[in-house]
């Protein structure tokens, strides 16, 4: 029974590869590149709303309104500043952000929102596999308290009063001190009676996160953040891509994309003296 399941898994992988390849070739034959405003090229896996259904992936659908490309993440709108097809990143900024010193995000978006998201990731694609990967973004957290706090890691937003967040309206009769910090916030950093108002992301290259100004914070919010849209499908369409994955255990299936080809190694556990024997090992040009 185990061997039968193992063989079925192998066949499933081969069928999936063929379907992805066929779908990709079909899309390339039927679809033309779209454009919107400052985004001159919108192509697979992205698509514009209204494009033929066979073009692009619905998970990467963009809308073009007022000559501006936008995408919805967790039902919130973000403007698209750029799409990089070389490193598989999309650059976004909160559509509600304004060039106003007291304009702050009202909607949270951070790493936890991408745990079950198979379309986007905070981890960049790295074909070298020899250097440490840096995160594409870092968190910015806004916290409010009913009393002042003195901490080198917290920057107070004093000049905006209760206009910082809509949620502060309930505190109109009580002074709330609002603070912002860049980087991961520890549980111990959230004091008693304080609350996290909003947590967002930025890809702004801060020079020194321990010596920030409100101008730095606002610039980082207007700059926005990058996400990776790297997937197995995009890897198949990119000749320089390299990615490995698999299921490991008594039946081992390992598959790697690299240089436009797919390598598959299928092994089965025999015993302690001979832990594995290779069932199949072959390359497929994709």
Image (cartoon, grey):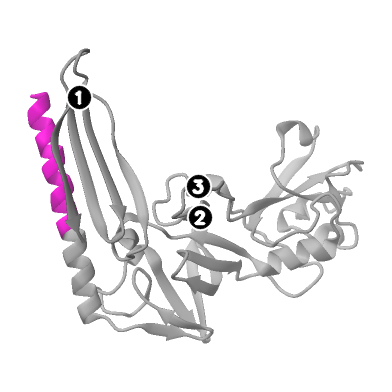
Which residue, given by chain and number where applicable, does mark 1 sit on? 276
Estimate how packed mark 3 is, as few (under 14), some (14 to 19) or many (20 or more) residues with alpha carbons within 10 Å.
few
Verify whether residue 10 appears in magenta: yes
Q: Would residue 245 be found to the left or right of residue 94 on screen?
A: left
Instruction: Judge by depth and name the residue closer to the eye, 109 or 160.
Output: 109
Disc 2 on helix, strand or loop?
loop
Give the left or right position of residue 135, taking residue 222 as reference: left
Quadrant holding the C terminus: bottom left
Of labels 1 and 2, earlier in sequence is 2
Q: Which residue is mark 3?
A: 130
Crowding at mark 1 (Cα within 10 Å: few <14, some 14-19, many 20+): some
Mark 2 neighbour density, 10 Å: few (under 14) some (14–19) many (20 or more): some
Q: Give me the C-alpha separation between circle 1 and circle 2.
A: 34 Å
| For residue 213, side relative to residue 262 (left or right) | right
Front tag of 1 and 2: 1
Whichever of callouts 2 and 3 sits on the residue coming sooner in the sequence is: 2
Q: Which residue is mark 2?
A: 124
Name the residue located 13 percent from the left edge and 52 percent from the top edge.
15
Q: Position of residue 59 (x, y in %)?
A: 36, 62
**Sequence-first disc among 1 and 3:** 3
Q: CA distance from mark 1 to mark 3?
A: 28 Å
Looking at the image, residue 230 lies above or below residue 69: above
Relative to 204, say whether 187 is above or below. above
- Segment tinted magenta in the rendering: 1-18
Residue at coordinates 14% horizontally, 49% vertically from top-left? 14
> Is 82 colored magenta in this rendering?
no
Asked which quadrant contains residue 77, the reply is: bottom right
């Amino acid at each position: 029974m185990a061997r039968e399941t193992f063989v079925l898994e192998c066949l499933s992988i081969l069928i999936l590869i063929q379907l992805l390849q066929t779908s990709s070739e079909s899309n390339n034959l039927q679809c033309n590149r779209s454009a919107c405003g400052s985004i001159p090229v919108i192509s697979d896996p992205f698509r514009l709303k209204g494009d033929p259904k066979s073009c692009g992936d619905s998970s990467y659908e963009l809308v073009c309104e007022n000559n501006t490309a936008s995408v919805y993440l967790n039902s919130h709108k973000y403007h698209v500043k750029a799409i990089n097809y070389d490193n598989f990143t999309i650059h976004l900024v909160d559509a509600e952000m304004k060039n106003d010193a007291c304009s702050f995000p009202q909607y949270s978006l951070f790493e936890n929102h991408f745990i079950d998201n198979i379309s986007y990731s905070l981890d960049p694609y790295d074909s070298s596999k020899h250097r440490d990967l840096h995160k594409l973004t870092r968190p910015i957290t806004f916290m409010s308290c009913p009393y002042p706090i003195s901490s080198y890691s917290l920057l107070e937003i004093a000049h905006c009063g209760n206009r910082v967040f809509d949620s502060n309206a309930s505190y109109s009769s009580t002074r709330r001190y609002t603070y912002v910090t860049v980087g991961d916030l520890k549980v111990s950093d959230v004091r008693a009676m304080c609350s996290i108002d909003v947590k967002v992301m930025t890809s702004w290259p801060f020079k020194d996160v321990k010596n920030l100004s409100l101008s730095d914070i606002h610039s980082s919010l207007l700059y926005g953040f990058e996400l990776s849209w790297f997937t197995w499908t995009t890897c198949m369409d990119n000749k320089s891509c390299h990615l490995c994955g698999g299921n490991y255990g008594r039946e081992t299936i390992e598959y790697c994309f690299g240089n436009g080809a797919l390598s598959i190694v299928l092994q089965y556990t025999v015993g302690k003296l001979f832990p594995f024997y290779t069932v199949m090992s072959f390359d497929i040009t994709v």
